[in-house]
Amino acid sequence: MKNLESKYCLGIESSADDFGIGLATFGGEILANKSDSYIPTEGGIHPREAARHHAEVADTVLQEALSKAGVKAKELTCIAFSQGPGLGPSLRTGATVARALASYLKIPLVGVNHSVAHIEIGKLQTGATDPVTLYASGGNTMVTAYESGRYRVFGETLDIALGNCLDVFGREAGLKTKKGLPIGAAIEQLAAKGEKLVPLPYVVKGMDLSLSGLVTAASAQLQNHSLEDVCFSLQEHAFSMVTEVTERALAHTEKKQVLLTGGVAANKRLQAMLAVISAEHDAQFSVVPLQYATDNGAMIAWTGTLAYRHGLTTPIDESIVKLRWRVDKVDVPWIQ
Amino acid sequence: MDTIDKTPKTRLIKKGAEASLFLSEWHNRRAIIKVRIPKSYRPAALDMQIRSYRTVHEPQLMHEAKTAGVATPLIYMVKVPESTIIMQYIEGPQMKTLLNSASKQHRRSLCTEIGRNVARLHKDGLIHGDLTTSNIIQAPDGTIYFVDFGLGEKNMELEAQGVDLHLLKRALQSTHFGFWEECFQAVMSGYSAVIGEVQAEKVYEKISEIERRGRYVEERKQ
């Protein structure tokens, strides 16, 4: 039996616009986390273009990750890949790379749920053990907590995701994605200069929320108010809604930790709101570090080690990608 | 006599996400004081607007629920500036606890009764807005009470009714995952018995549509 620190899992993430490869030891050390992002020339992610991008950069990112980790391909124990949820063409590109590597190296393949991976990397990096997690990104907005073998969904968006809400509004307002400055970050900077709260829809239904009406209303208000004020009001409304829903899950589950993960976790205003409710419920609040907040290969690699150690591998003929693989359909036997 | 009784008998029984519930007395009756506490994470103006709105609407909806034939606590007093509602204390277990300890048959009859009550609300254009098994209480005489109408609304649309039941389904899935399916089936059969099969079928279809609209649902068409 090899030492945990000298067993490695390589993880491939390709569910949306980021192509990432990470390398994790079975002991939980991240040795490499490399990625390359597809940036659309205009509008949102074009799935076929994103997939084309991923195929083009796969080889380079793989070499970078292995060389950063100082690990040779033949030393790997298993290959993990993001099997879903996500965009079909993007996911398939990553899955193809993963299958090729696993067959060539004759090592097991481990299909990982992308949402589970966001939660697991957050726990690994922050030391949270049993949190209520708000996972907010461009494609997902959900409040989950572990209960009897799975991460259960206690609240989620009824329509679009929080990151998507910000992106769509940003594009309506004429903002563009730049390298190193996602639209969400641009909105955050503008919002910091806003002062006036413009009334917008606030839609919380039970533990779920709806954001699509908010985008429409905020976009319409650009006619009447400054961009800064609308950005400020959009953030205040949207973040208040997700915070209220997270607080409801916290009160319901009576857990003592709150974890913020996913791309929108980078937003300081959202962090501040969640810190307030955590304190009110005597819960410890943690935020996943920035490099693990957005989609990344390291989270897939780390979750791959957890699954592999519990005997969960994915035969090639069952490695078809699952575009709508819900987090609450996945057994997580590594949690006691 | 409109001051809140803050005698030693008043004690906090639940600190929820949105409100704190105190068990107290109101003119020699046991009462619940529900206080919507200010939320410092959101802007004061938005916070005041949300709390006042819910404090005003909750008692109105509870009153209308009674007219529709659904038992709800009696309202003793409403104090909007303090976001406070004083209401009847309903003694009895929450449905959350009951379902977990009940026999399969008893669970079925409880859930059927819940479904009947939801249908009574919907028939009269009332949406509860937060149907969970924590918000349903069975009194010692067997009567099922619905509480916490803070997120409710008046709405006759199929969409709102679908979301209302979808939320109950989700609550059953996350809290009673061992037997949520039989529970939800029983809810829908009670619902259908009151609202009629044709309408129940429409709402059922709507629930599926809402679920498909959600992100990452396997049933969703590509």
Image (cartoon, coloured by chain):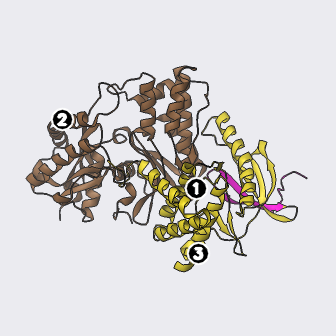
Chain colours: A brown, B yellow
How far across and down, in percent of the image, does residue A318 sit?
20, 59
The quadrant in which the C terminus of chain A is found is: bottom left
Distance Cα–Cα, label 3 vs label 2: 59 Å
Residue at the disc numbered 1? A251
How far across and down, in percent of the image, does residue A290 sit?
37, 38
Residue at the disc numbered 3? B109
Is B42 left, or right, of A74 in this rendering?
right
Q: Residue at x 15, y 47 (%)?
A: A71
Q: Write down the chain letter for disc 2.
A: A
State the residue in front, A204 or A152: A204
Residue extending furthest toward the front: B198
- Is residue B3 part of the magenta span, yes or no? yes
* Mark 1 surroundings within 10 Å by alpha-carbon count, few (fewer than 14), some (14 through 19), many (20 or more): some
Identify residue type, mark 1.
Ala
Identify residue type, mark 2.
Val
* Mark 2 surroundings within 10 Å by alpha-carbon count, few (fewer than 14), some (14 through 19), many (20 or more): some
Distance Cα–Cα, label 1 vs label 3: 29 Å
Residue at the disc numbered 2? A57
The answer to the question of whether label 2 and label 1 lie on touching residues, with beta carbons closer than 8 A, is no
Task: Tell me the quarter of the picture where residue B193 sits.
Answer: bottom right
Residue A145's label in the rendered image is: none
Which type of secondary structure does the marked residue at label 3 adopt? helix
Relative vertical location of residue B74 with respect to residue A299 in this rendering, above or below: below
Magenta span of residues = B1-25
For the question of whether residue A331 can be seen, the reply is yes
Is A152 left, or right, of B47 in this rendering?
left
Q: Write down the chain letter for disc 1.
A: A
The quadrant in which the N terminus of chain A is found is: bottom left
